[in-house]
Amino acid sequence: MKKRILLITGSFGNGHLQVSGNLKEMFEKKYKDRVIVDECDLFLQAHPRLTSVLRKLYLYSFSYFRNVYGYLYYMGKNNKQTSAYRYFSYHYLYSKIEKFKPDIIVSTFPTTALTLLKNKKIPIVNVVTDYHFHKSWLTENALKYFVPCENTKIQFIEAGVKEKNIKVLGLPISEKFDIRISKKQWLAKNNLDIKKETLLLVAGAFGVLKNFNKIVDAILARNKNIQLAIVCGKNVKLKNLLKRLYKENYHVKILGYTTNMREWMQASTVIVTKAGGVTITESLASNIPLVLLKPVPGQEKENALYFEKNNMAKIADTNRELVDIISKLLENKQQLIEIKKNMAQNYLPNATEKICEDIVKIIKV
């Protein structure tokens, strides 16, 4: 009989959804004859209307009230979770468990309701999606915590989690990032010059960023041997504006939403993006030096500080600082080499596959 895996995720930010999606894909690829996986966006399914409102507030605070978001994050980091909050979504979760009857619960989203399942005697594992500890990840009855690095492991131990219950396997990104592509072929395919340094600007990651074209102009003015690939994501307004402004400049390639981030990361010299756990791990896998622009106080800031401390990234708090950092990196090849060396030493490959293997061992498939 197939074992049942309940995969808990959350749609507050894309990182949790990406991680749960990567795990689900790996389970179905390697163990489809032995397991059944049910992926559950818990808050969305339990409270669809409320979640829709909260998600908009989350994105709004992320873009416009960054310090407020940071205050709430750090306020909740060490405070005890209230009993009332634990019951948020619990009844839906309990009903889900009664119907699906999972052999294990795998959570990629901090869900305090899991603590209330002590009497169900179902193994629970948490897959942590950032490089810094937050108390919301703690579950009294968790059998295992999969964390992305040794630093996170130490923080969980300091918070009272037994070392035997923590495993450092990396952050589970798509397995395709461990497969190399030809930089020369990719640049040629996209009509870019192999002899120039390629800067990958993930513009869509920054939400609302005024005068983005001025940043582009300043980068081009300071660096002559450079070409830009700008990913606008789902920001159609920004994409159309940049296409209009740079239609005559063949050193600037404007992209909308793309499913080829692995190829662009591996073909570029430096990436400018936000400090989400999944994004920086994909950059780590691609061995591309990071410049993290204006990290939002909270998990993004903590991720950025960890990467900066380990010389795998630079933090730019202003647009001017961003232009200066990019110019200095491109002028100093030895600095780029050192960053790439540190990234290679810190990257843990095949995290998704290894985590799935461990979970399968727990339920004795």
Image (cartoon, rainbow, N blue to C red):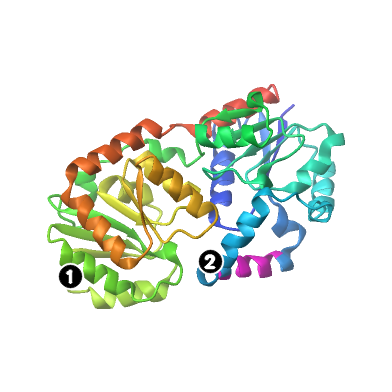
Query: How far across and down, in percent of the image, does residue 75 sit?
Result: 65, 56
Q: Quadrant of residue 293?
A: bottom left
The residue located at (62%, 44%) in the rendering is: 108
Which of the two marks, 1 or 2, is nearer to us in this view? 2
The number of callouts visible is 2
Rendered view: 353 above or below 276: above
Depth order, front residue of 38/32: 38
Is 58 magenta? The answer is yes
Element on which disc 1 rests: loop
Disc 2 target residue: 66
Disc 1 target residue: 249
Is residue 202 something one can see in this rendering?
Answer: yes
Q: Quadrant of residue 34?
A: top right
Q: Earlier in the sequence, mark 1 or mark 2?
A: 2
Q: Residues within 10 Å of mark 2 (few under 14, many from 20)?
A: some
Magenta region, mostly helix, strand or loop?
helix
User: Dots 1 and 2: beta carbons under 8 Å?
Assistant: no
Q: Look at the image and tell me in which quarter the C terminus lies.
A: top right
Rendered view: 97 above or below 143: below
Query: How far across and down, in percent of the image, does residue 214 sit?
Result: 27, 74
Is residue 233 something one can see in this rendering?
Answer: no
User: What is the spatial separation of the Cα atoms under label 1 and label 2, in whole angstroms?
Assistant: 34 Å
The residue located at (32%, 77%) in the rendering is: 241
**Which three-letter amino acid code belongs to the residue tagged 2?**
Arg
